[in-house]
Image (cartoon, rainbow, N blue to C red):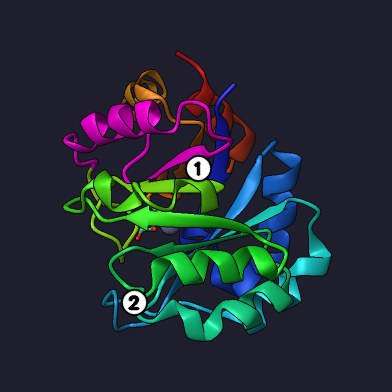
């Protein structure tokens, strides 16, 4: 069954501890942390100190999505804060191959994210260093945007590329009950959702709805 990773970007930032407890009780498969630097993307969120404070408060997998220019500089601190997965953007990192090695050497699973306009071909020579590929189905920076349907083709192509590899395929942006089924049919293993999960107080129902087709 597809995994659902709620994005804390849509959570109540004044009450993150309660929010992650509610998400865990609601059946979230992992927690998605959108780290934004105000440079690679226009928005600014949180970094290692906040992740570190939340780490002892949840047993779920911490899936960290670094929308940060030159993410190399913060890999060690994000890993030390307790991330399980660290995903960097192909567009933001200078030496991708080296950064992926470093993420694994820090004891984390290594992910690469691709903006909507970036070709999956940038992954051709690093497939053996990857544990996760994150397809952005919106331009990163904000929640609540509309799904860019051209990314379905990219998901299908990546699914073919990674046959035989132990790599999970995650999709992020504009995921709701209408777009989730298309993503799963195309090959998504994990759906990130902010707006759709936090739309009402019943997080369990909202998460479950993303898994039903
Ligand atoms: C966007 C973030 C997403 C975002 C998704 O830059 O990477 O994780 O929170 O939000 P929704 O589900 O509202 O599109
Ligand atoms: Zn994200």
Which quarter of the figure has residue 106?
A: bottom right
State the residue at coordinates (72%, 77%): 80
- Res. 34 visible in picture: no
State the residue at coordinates (51%, 31%): 189
Name the residue beneath numbered marker 1: 197
Residue 202: percent from left, percent from top: 59, 38
Which of the numbered marks, if any, corresponds to residue 94?
A: 2
88 w.r.t. 162: above or below: below
Which quarter of the figure has residue 94?
A: bottom left
Q: Which residues are magenta?
A: 147-176
* Quadrant position of the C terminus in the picture: top left
Determine whether the beta carbon of the residue marked 1 sits less than 8 angstroms from the nearest atom of ligand 1.
yes
| Viewer-proximal residue among 126 and 133 | 126
Which quarter of the figure has residue 160?
A: top left
Mark 1 surroundings: few (<14), some (14-19) or many (≥20) residues within 10 A: many
Which of the numbered marks, if any, corresponds to residue 142?
A: none
């Amino acid at each position: 069954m597809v995994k659902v990773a709620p994005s804390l970007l849509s959570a109540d930032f004044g009450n993150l501890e309660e929010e992650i407890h509610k998400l865990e009780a609601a059946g979230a498969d992992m927690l998605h942390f959108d780290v934004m630097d105000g440079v690679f993307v226009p928005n600014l969120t949180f970094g290692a100190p906040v992740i570190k404070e939340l780490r002892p408060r949840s047993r779920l997998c911490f899936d960290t999505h670094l929308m940060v220019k030159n993410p190399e500089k913060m890999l060690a601190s994000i890993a030390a804060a307790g991330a399980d997965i660290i995903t960097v953007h192909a567009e933001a990192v200078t030496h991708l191959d080296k950064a992926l090695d470093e993420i694994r050497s820090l004891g984390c699973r290594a992910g690469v994210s691709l903006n909507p306009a970036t070709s999956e071909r940038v992954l051709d020579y690093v497939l053996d260093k990857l544990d996760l590929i994150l397809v952005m189905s919106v331009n990163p920076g904000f929640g609540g945007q509309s799904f860019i349907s051209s990314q379905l083709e990219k998901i299908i192509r990546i699914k073919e590329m990674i046959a035989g590899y132990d790599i999970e395929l995650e999709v992020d942006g504009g995921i709701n009950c209408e777009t989730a089924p298309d993503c799963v049919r195309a090959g998504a293993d994990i759906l990130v959702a902010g707006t759709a999960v936090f739309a009402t107080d019943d997080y369990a129902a909202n998460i479950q709805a993303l898994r039903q087709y």
